[in-house]
Image: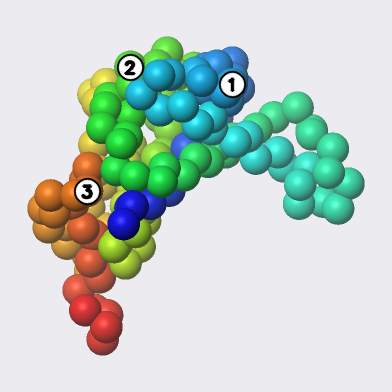
Amino acid sequence: MGRTSEIIVLARSAEEVMEPLTRQGWNTEWPKPFIRIEEGMFDNWGRPHGACFTWVIQFDKALWHGLLAHLESLAWPDPYSVQVLVRDQDDHCFGLWMIYDGKLVEVPLPRTEREPFGSSVTGILSRTDSPYT
């Protein structure tokens, strides 16, 4: 049975950097493209406003090894605005990754803990305050 992971990239003024990643087959390791989320999607007009800050992708399997390093290597116009949200299918919530000193680093979230898991790129992120853990 396959695993799924969702990744959301938030970054200010990154349309040019992310555009190649929105093309089908942009990388042989990750054949699915990122989907650009236009802010016009939320105003009932469906028209792009020119600025996009959000891109999403879902992987059917944990085949996205190296994706965080790839995102880290991009020439972000505003690296301080880059946020990457990652949720593997067994995670209780999205994990937050941000660029610090040129590296994408997971930002510790209150009341969460990450445990290694062999079928996951990042391990499993659990809420420590959840009654369902």
Q: Residue 86, image x and y in percent?
A: 36, 47
- Is the N terminus in the top left, top right, bottom left or bottom right quadrant? bottom left
Residue beneath the point at 41% across and 42% down:
59
**Which type of secondary structure does the marked residue at label 1 adopt?**
loop
| Mark-to-mark CA distance, 2 and 1 | 18 Å
Sequence-first disc among 2 and 1: 1
Residue 76 vertical position relative to residue 115 in the rendered view, above or below: above
Give the left or right position of residue 6, taking residue 89 as reference.
right
The residue wearing badge 1 is 23
Residue beneath the point at 29% across and 43% down:
62
Q: Residue 79, image x and y in percent?
A: 41, 24
Residue 55 or 81: which is nearer the viewer?
55
Q: Residues within 10 Å of mark 1 (few under 14, many from 20)?
A: some
Residue 37 or 32: which is nearer the viewer?
32
Q: Amino acid at mark 1?
A: Arg
**Which type of secondary structure does the marked residue at label 2 adopt?**
helix
The residue wearing badge 3 is 120
Give the left or right position of residue 126, taking residue 116 as reference.
right
